Image (cartoon, grey):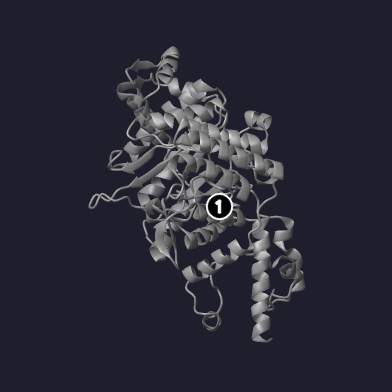
Amino acid sequence: MAESQKRRGRLDRRAARKNRNAMAAPYTIRRTGLVSLIDDDAIAIIERNADRILDEIGMDFRGDPQVLALFREHGARVDGERVRFDPGWCRDKIKTAPRVFTQHARNPARSVQIGGDAQVYAPSFGPPFVHDMESGRRYATLGDFHKITKLHYSLGAVNHSGGVVVEPVDVAVPLRHLEMAKAHLTLSDKPFMGAVTAPERARDTIDMCRIAMGKEFVDNNCVLYSVVNTNAPLVMDETMLWALKEYAQAGQCTVVSPFVLGGAMSPVSVAATLAQVLAEVLASVALIQLIRPGAPAAFGTFFSPISLKTGAPTFGTPEGTQFQMCAKALADRLGLPFHSVGALTASKVPDAQAGYESQAQLMGAALAGVNFIIHATGCLEGLLTTGYEKIVMDADRCAAMQRFVGGVDFSEAAQAMEAFHEVEPGGHFLGAQHTQDNFETAFWMGDMSDNGTYEQWAAEGSDWQHRRASKRVKSLLEQYEPPAMEDSIRDALDDYVARRSREIAI
């Protein structure tokens, strides 16, 4: 066979994989068991310590007298902005939160299940910088936000459009949420995350969803998934508190995710940090249920140990994975979906360090049974940077994790008994009908790994993986086609953004 024909065959196979990606399931159902590092006795210890923290120390809820009055009305002990809770009080209030719910996408086929055995893989959140192999590291722009949203829409292994995939620093801060929400709604039809940096920004996001999906539908369904971070230790500041209120009142999902750098914002042990995080989640999710019983909520975590030599955060450490595998059990005990981190790395570029740190954390999240894996793609520099090449490299790893947790096929077809009758002892199965029927899907094949010979790799340019990733980014952006949207809806979104921009500028 001529070399050109071989190359065409490889290109055809890659195109076939691309089509399968485009039609990928909207989320993964985990069929593997959980890996947990906490037993019933340890769970009892952590829960008892969390109750003691809330009873003896309490938690500050700052800047909102109405919230303090609500706590007082329902029997919590309020002293200034400090709220203390009797043991068991928070757990009793949390019972109304759903164990499993659906976040609806603009395209119903893209809607995701949150909780249960479902796993959702979502982009990194919040970096002010972007990195690519041609231009290096630089501040992100709205153009970068658009490109990264298009990439995630094009990648079948990424189930969610995310939120602040990068900070578009060329847009004024008071207006950014409008441009970001419009991008998620028009450049993708996957579910996305709401703004949390001011109550009016949360309201704008909800209103834009009403335009795109219908007011009645939004008012009766969860269409936004938004993360509020406690200010550890034991503080909910007014910015996060106001966002929590807006989304809870609207019946949208609020994830309470304590942001903890172990050793600075919590004690240096995993056990102590678990108790602190559980206390913060208990108090905050109880508030969500006081505001609107039955409003969807999730138990979130972001835990990264700091280097006690330099004070810098570390990623891909054993403690980070240990923490996830213990916290998942605590979330299950509360009956809440579990949200945690994925492919984190401190590396500045998509190199070997980025690969092994990200894979360690991502594998830990998959094995722990995390329901919503945020920062699953793109992280560089400890979430200060989103890497273009890193996005497609991480998406490949997400696809592998999804295949892994999906379990082993033991169906009659997979047993392949007819193949044993077809192939004589000492023969091979390459030409068997079972192989021919299943060769495209039998074994997982990544888009970013080169499994050919050295000679083939050299003939194709001797590209290291980050160079192959750069080419794939360009290819995906060139091939991108926006999802369908009625012109009237698109015009209404444009009008809303223009009007609110004028009002905010005034």
Q: Is residue 117 above or below residue 429?
A: above
Whether residue 254 can be seen here: no
Q: Is residue 154 above or below residue 183?
A: below
Going 54% across and 22% down the picture, which residue do you hit? 292
Q: Is residue 351 above or below residue 35?
A: below
Residue 226 falls left or right of residue 10: left
Q: Nearer the viewer, residue 370 or 353?
A: 353
Going 74% across and 64% down the picture, which residue do you hit? 417
Amino acid tagged 1: Thr
Tell me how many marks there are. Answer: 1
Q: Is residue 461 above or below residue 205?
A: below
Residue 350 at x, y percent in the picture: 43, 63
Number of other residues with Cα within 10 Å of mark 1, as a class: few under 14, some 14 to 19, many 20 or more: many
**Residue tagged by mark 1?**
149
Q: Nearer the viewer, residue 330 or 19?
A: 19
Whether residue 132 can be seen here: yes
Going 28% across and 39% down the picture, which residue do you hit? 267
Residue 146 at x, y percent in the picture: 54, 53
Of the 4 image quadrants, the one containing the N terminus is bottom right
Residue 473 at x, y percent in the picture: 54, 64
The image quadrant of residue 182 is top right
Q: Element type at marker 1?
A: helix
Residue 90 at x, y percent in the picture: 44, 23
